[in-house]
Amino acid sequence: MKKILIVDDNNSNRILLRTLLEEYGEDNGLKLDIREAVNGLEAVAAAQKEHFSLILMDIMMPYMDGIEATKRIHALDSKAMIIAVSAVDDGERQQQILINGAEDYIAKPINADIFTARLGNYFSLIASRHSEGRKFNPEAANLFTQETFSRKILFYVQNEDDLAQFWEYYLVDSNIRCESLSDAIRTVYALASIGLKMGVHLQIIVEKCPENMYITLVGVNEIDAKIIKLVMSKNPSVTDYKMGVEKFCIRLPYHCEDPVLSTLPAVQETIVVDVAHPSVTDTNVSMATYTSVQGEKQVYNYMESEDMEDLKEYVGKLNSLMLIVGGEIERHEVDEISDNLQRISRISSGYIESYTIGRALASMGHVIRDHSNLFITKSNDLAPMCAAFGRDLGKWIQLIFVEGTTSVNYMDDTIVANAQMIESMLTMDDANSSDAAENLDDIFDF
């Protein structure tokens, strides 16, 4: 039996929808348990008590409108199909209810034939989403199993923005929660970032089955195996992984939950609304209570003007030198790279806001000076990483001091990770390999 909830403050509309649903159920042999709610508050309370397969939601209602009710019900029960049914011709409101969880929009006055045809689609989709145990994919990308769902997410990592989308999707925007998900995402991010700096365009493929989630990095055969081992040695919590000829794959126990649930106050199960006294609408469930605060960009002017001018000059010189890495670079040019790194370090280390970057640049400068001959020998391999590093420093100045960012430390992790990756390329063959491994620490300390 499928439970259906009709949410509308107009009694005639509820009667019409109930009649159409009952006729559809009789014609198609479906048993339908149809409930009603007269406003959004009642709908949310009902959804807290039980699961509804289908919810027909009006938009304009007293006490809580359909947009807010849809948002809360979708957070409570993501598998409930919510369909907006409204006479509202305001395009913005229509978009808002779809953005907040409604899956379709039906305009009033309702056309019975169109409504009945859509019901067939809705019930077909509902049946499909409750059969996730089926496995459809005979050509899975991961190295563990072919028994995965047919859907997959593919990220083409061709630049830093692509890699940032992968990071933000799983650690910021997604409601997916897996054991060790953060560690796995950071590991894949680190490997893909290394590939990017080396000019290797990788692919990240994410697949799922009822029990596990698989993250596969394709194209790792172009990354030195020593680097991959160093990366994995710095993240021992990621133990369930496999290496193939060109693939690296992590398996994670999978379950899905929505973090929004932990932040939404409960709506009382019993709601009494006195229509004769509108003042009753003061219910502690106002729209403003649930408005998320987004970080605003800010320009950070913490550096003295003379230091700022010197910083721009040294970063400009360093960037020019980094661009010639890979050509016939000479010893004095390597020394100039080291010197400029030290100059930038002395300026940035003088301010607590950029101390982390300053420390990383000082270390990088010392390593390059101590391994100048090796730097020249590996110049071709280092070229893409050095060029990217120079661009990152320029981007840091532009974002922090000119355009503005959401955090004064917005670029810290990228710059530190890239600096230490260049160091690792120069120290991985040192007699004390553990020192080389230490150079990767901050890749995972985001």
Image: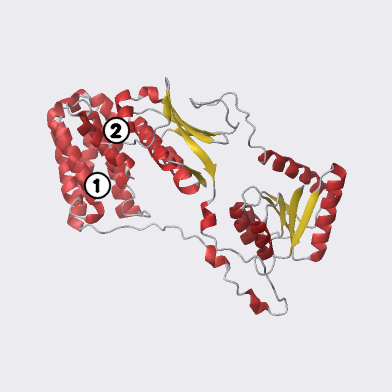
Give the percent coordinates (x, y) of residue 432.
18, 29
Give the percent coordinates (x, y) of residue 1.
77, 47
Q: What residue do we see at 24% from left, 39% from top? A: 319
The mark found on residue 416 in the picture is none
Residue 178 visible, this orientation: yes
Residue at label 1?
Answer: 357
Dot 2 amino acid type: Met
Q: How is the image coloured?
A: secondary structure
The relative height of residue 213 versus residue 105 in the rendered view (above or below) is above
The quadrant holding residue 332 is top left
The one nearer the camera, 170 or 213, is 213
Residue at label 2?
Answer: 385
The relative height of residue 265 versus residue 136 in the rendered view (above or below) is below
Dot 1 amino acid type: Ile
Q: Which of marks 1 and 2 is nearer the N terminus?
A: 1
User: With 35 as the anchor, is 251 left or right in this view?
Assistant: left
How packed mark 2 is, by other alpha carbons closer than 10 Å (few <14, some 14-19, many 20 or more), is many
